[in-house]
Amino acid sequence: MFAPDDPLAPAGPVFAEPWHAQTLAIADALISSGHITAADWAETLGAALRATDAAGRADTSETYYGAALTALETLTARNTLVSAADLLLRKQQWIAAYRQTPHGKPVMLDPG
């Protein structure tokens, strides 16, 4: 782990967007808690990255984290009580809440 004043620490932020860090943190939490294995994560992420490549998308941090999110959603639906339909519904609710939120205000999602 790097300390803030460590000369070997990366210059600037490690993640371009908060959701990039959150995606990997959730995957790590699922692995640490035993809900998924590291092998499941690696295999599913690899498949998502290959699908991105097969679709002709450029190899960028956005496509990488998009594939990581796809892998996380796949594993969540496969290994927990949250179904793919529930994930899709929640994603649609987030999109609607985001679009209805004035610029600069926090996005509030109904907990139901």
Image: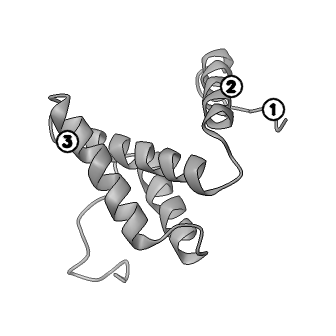
What is the number of the mark on residue 60? 3
The quadrant of the picture occupied by the N terminus is bottom left
Are the residues at dot 2 and dot 1 in contact (C-beta closer than 8 Å)?
Answer: yes
So how many labels did they put on this image?
Answer: 3
CA gap between label 3 and label 2 equals 27 Å
CA gap between label 1 and label 3 equals 33 Å
- Residue at 44% x, 59% y is 24
Residue 102, image x and y in percent? Answer: 65, 19
Q: Identify residue for label 1.
A: 110
- Residue at 31% x, 45% y is 48
In the image: residue 16, left or right of residue 56: right
Q: Residue furthest top?
A: 100
Q: Secondary structure at mark 3?
A: loop
Label 2 neighbourhood size at 10 Å, few (<14), some (14-19), many (20+)?
A: some
Under mark 2, the amino acid is: Gln
- Residue at 14% x, 29% y is 56
Q: Secondary structure at mark 1?
A: loop
Q: Identify residue for label 2.
A: 93
CA gap between label 2 and label 1 equals 8 Å
What is the number of the mark on residue 52? none
Residue closest to the eye, 40 or 23:
40
Q: Secondary structure at mark 2?
A: helix
- Residue at 85% x, 35% y is 112
Residue 58, image x and y in percent? Answer: 15, 34
In the image: residue 110, left or right of residue 68: right
Q: Compare marks 1 and 3 and give the one earlier in the sequence.
A: 3
Under mark 1, the amino acid is: Asp
Is any part of residue 61 visible from this angle? no
Under mark 3, the amino acid is: Thr
Q: Compare marks 3 and 2 and give the one earlier in the sequence.
A: 3
